[in-house]
Image: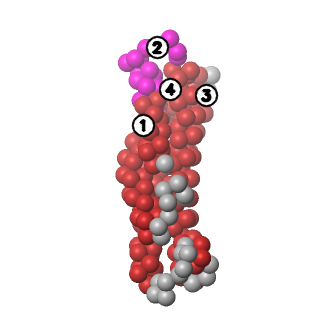
Amino acid sequence: MAYLLRTLLLIMISSLTLTTLMAHQVITLTLSHIEVAIPAFIFAIFAQAFVMFYFIGVARLVENVHTILQNGENLKELFEEAPSDLSPYQKKVNQFYYESKLCKRQTVPWTILMLVLGMIAFLLGGAHDTHLVSKSTHAGVVYGFLVAALIGFVRQWFYLGKMHHLLRKLKALFQIPDGQM
């Protein structure tokens, strides 16, 4: 899943770059800047929603495993036959729990910032097109959005790798086949 999400992020950054280059008339296509900006931003929303829910979902999964091990209840969900000493599992899952929360904390705020700035830039683009705001107002918010998107892209790329490895380690710890989770 992390590889799919990384592909979505690459497509998102590519489409935002194309849109920006078209706005500065570095590249000209038969489509206008507006005709490229609308699907590019819709795709950005789509990609960011998937990335955000991946981080939230994996963190929630790790939290559920952590809770099961801490409470000692519902151990049958993790083990066919529960071991008498859970401390090695608890130690590893405590680390996984910390790492999953860290990954989520490092990426979700950037996702939210991208979405908020992107929506404002999108609306200001429409307002600029109808001559209600100046070009510099629209451009300023777009540049903020692009900076947030670049920083968020790098963070998401890095932490998607970390989260993917964390999920693989969690599955290996409890001998869960690849087709599950």
Residue at the front extreme, as displayed:
81
**Earlier sequence position, callout 4 versus callout 2:** 2
* Residue nearer the viewer, 13 or 138: 13
Q: Position of residue 26 (x, y in %)?
A: 37, 18
Residue that carries the numbered disc 2 in the rendered image: 29
Mark 1 vs mark 2: which is more N-terminal?
1
Query: Pointers 1 and 3 in contact (CB under 8 A)?
Result: no
Disc 1 marks which residue? Answer: 10
The magenta stretch spans residue 112: no
Q: What is the number of callouts on the image?
A: 4
Distance from disc 3 to disc 2, alpha carbons, whole Å, reads 23 Å
In three-dimensional space, the C-alpha distance between marks 1 and 4, rounded to whole angstroms, equals 28 Å
- For marks 3 and 4, give the CA distance: 9 Å
Magenta segment: 16-32
Q: Position of residue 156 (x, y in %)?
A: 42, 50
Type of amino acid under label 1: Leu
Number of other residues with Cα within 10 Å of mark 4, as a class: few under 14, some 14 to 19, many 20 or more: some
* Figure check: 159 above or below 70: above
Disc 1, disc 2: CB below 8 Å? no
* Residue 135, disc: 4
**Residue type highlighted by circle 2:** Leu
User: Is residue 9 visible from the viewing direction of this image?
Assistant: no
The amino acid type of the residue labelled 3 equals Ala
Which residue: 50% across, 64% down? 176
Write down the residue under mark 3.
Answer: 127
Residue 27, given in percent of the width and then of the height, sits at 40, 17
Amino acid type at circle 4 is Lys
